[in-house]
Amino acid sequence: MTRQNAQSGVFLPAHVRCRTVQAPPLEYADILGGVGLLTPLPPKELEIVMTLLATLRGLSVIGAVASVVCFAGASRADGRSIDAAPLASGPFPVACSDVAYDTKLISQDGASPADFWEGNPQNGQLRYFTDVLLEPQDTIQIDPIAPDDGNLYPRTRNKPVPFVVLVCYPTSVDNLRADYPLPNSTAVPKMQRLGQGPIFPPPLPVPLSPFQDNPNLLPLLVMSHGLAGSPLDPHMLDAITRLASFGYVVAAPFHGDARFSVIHIGNIADLISVASNFDHFVEMQALRPVALRATIDVLLADANFAPHINPNKIGGFGASMGGASMTELLGAWLTDGFISQNAHPTVQDARVKAVVGYVPYAGEHFLPAFGENNATAANVRTPYLAIVGTADTIAPMDRMEQAMNLFQSSRYMVALTGVPHGYESSYAGDVFGWTIPFLDAYVKGDAAARDTFLRQKDVLGGLTDQLIIDVTVPPQTGLWVVNSEDNGQSGRGFQFEARNGTMVMTYFGYLQNGQAYWSLASGPLSNGTFSGSMSRYSGGSALGGAYAPATIAGSDGQVVVDFTNDVAGTIVLPGEPAKAISKFVFSGSATPVIVPANGLWVIDAENNGQAGRGFQIEQNTGVLVFTYYGYDTAGQETWYLAAGSISGNSFTGILTAYVGGTVLGSDYAPATQAGSAGQVAITFTTPTTGTITLPGESPKAISKFVW
């Protein structure tokens, strides 16, 4: 079914939703007056102004322009029924690391503490927080090396760049340390001082079962503040301490943006400064993900903090420009061409499981943050919650909406009606009423929290919330592996396929005697979680033999899978602790004449409602992996694997056997090849139909199995 969009005249699928976005009026006179064009500009600046104006004209943002923003996805509006309670503060008191500074040095410089927190230069001289630290030996500092990339790091390439880090964390009610006063009547709560370590809540009993997490290991959030701000900005410190009160260790680097680029893009006059010093602006942005990744590194290695952090539960929170920094850390590329809008990747960090962006920046209408049309946002495969303000003119929400519609992960955007660019403590109930359930779901991996978050439609009281983007991405169909076993050697694995809310998982592994076997589980996929009984079968058709139906022959036990996103998750197999899994990736360099559908296929003549044999097909850019699930002549399950290229619409491959791999509930063991069952040949007639010739058998019609 399609429908026509009234504004654009474009025919759209029925599941695609659109809304009209009115860009703020922008006239030539606004720009010229904003940069003081009543006085002559030097030739370089004049050329930039004229190029900027031409670019704006070409992008149709001169005048009040309406554009239609559309997005597709599995909208869950009908399934959302929970009016959640506001969450302003959590159950834990909060303490923070040492960031004491020398007030005398600051006074002698005639500056304010914020000048050093933010890296504001004075008379051409650089200033940064490291210059005035009172107890530097007890302050967390990092010196990451800027990458060897002259495009993004022209002045800092291959050089160490210093950053100070504030860490706040849940503490004990018995922590009586004093708060550290700051200007504007704020304070760092229960701050560590010279020689003091962190005080965490009293330890809880550690579960005896290896399948349960140690409750004393806390999730880590790395936080990125807004442009030209700092973690000690009153609003940012408020957000940091609230997050820590919910049981998160929150680590926030002082980006010191002004050390690299003195830009405040909330002022239209700064557009010319951005254009004139665009390489500085780019470098400043590119260094932010460098600091974020290094912050995670140092916390996971710190003798005081690492023993209290769960290294498998790491998330992020970014405000304004910090939202862009987080998006780049997840894989989006940074625009480094002002006119060309070319983009290059910054550093990335796959350890980050989910991110919240508060009023996140994704560029302007004339300068997207992630390349032309924010196209490189398609590299993001990590769950993301954006909380935006409908009155925000600094970080236009439609730019982030454009970027998020390209994300390949589960993604959610909540619009707060009437909220401008910025954060006030009065917003906390709504902001954290969405943030905490999301982080608990996707960082902590709390299945109950995920169920609640995916049924939440708003937060009671306070602001008016509107869910603008609501897309939960199912796991990708095909081969998946245990991360720790993906070492280039043969072994075991799984194949997942979800359809209409039901998932089928095929496990291929090994018995105690080393023989290859398989089992199958099916059941509902609910809010990213799947569980099912791993059923065994016997007595089905052997290769080259007559058709025979199979019968159920017991169960290996229960499997539970919690998908973090479409390509990653955690699996608990019978007798084994939770293990990280991910989509197995392979690729070729061609496009077949017919692209077969990935997933379960069956022989048409054997698709009669009884258990039997079948096979999994997965194709990517001309390379096909074929897994056959059947039975040997004794009726025992067995499997074979073939891989190769598709030529035209045909595939041939050798059915390779394997033995001796990992047994359920036992230590890892690599498998070895054990000969071949012969050659398989497939000719595809459509993406979902074809003909297969198995060893010792006549050609048979096959089709994609659906349910």
Image (cartoon, helix red, strand yellow):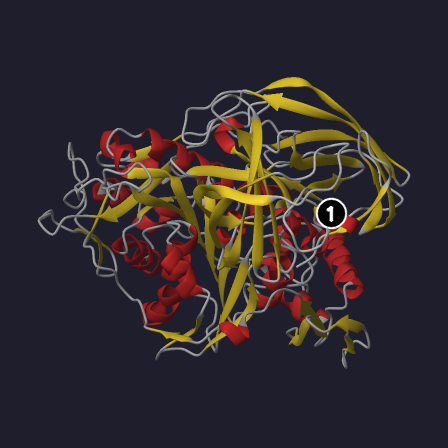
Is residue 301 visible from the viewing direction of this image? yes
Q: Which of 203 and 172 is in front in this view?
A: 203
Residue 337, relative to residue 449: is it above or below?
above
Is residue 350 visible from the viewing direction of this image? no
Quarter holding residue 683: top right
Give percent across and percent down for residue 327: 55, 49
Drawn side of residue 218 relative to residue 177, left or right: right
Q: Is mark 1 on a helix, strand or loop?
A: strand
Q: Which of 563 and 211 is in front in this view?
A: 211
User: Which residue bears the numbered disc 1?
Assistant: 602
Quarter holding residue 517: top right
Q: Residue at 77%, 55% (x, y): give it.
A: 51
Residue 579, relative to residue 322: is it above or below?
above
Q: Nearer the viewer, residue 246 or 645?
A: 645
Give percent across and percent down for residue 390: 52, 74
How crowded pointer 1 is (Cα within 10 Å; few <14, some 14-19, many 20+) is rated as many
Q: Which of 200 and 117 is in front in this view?
A: 200
Give percent across and percent down for residue 555: 47, 42
Q: Residue at 59%, 26% (x, y): give it.
A: 148
Drawn side of residue 658 relative to residue 606, left or right: left
Q: How many marks?
A: 1
Residue 285, relative to residue 655: is it above or below?
below
Give percent across and percent down for residue 506: 58, 42
Q: Which quadrant: the C terminus?
A: bottom right
Drawn side of residue 57 relative to residue 163, left or right: right
As shown in the figure, which amino acid type bears the numbered disc 1? Val
Drawn side of residue 340 relative to residue 295, left or right: right
Q: Residue at 58%, 50% (x, y): give it.
A: 504
Q: Which quadrant: the N terminus?
A: bottom right
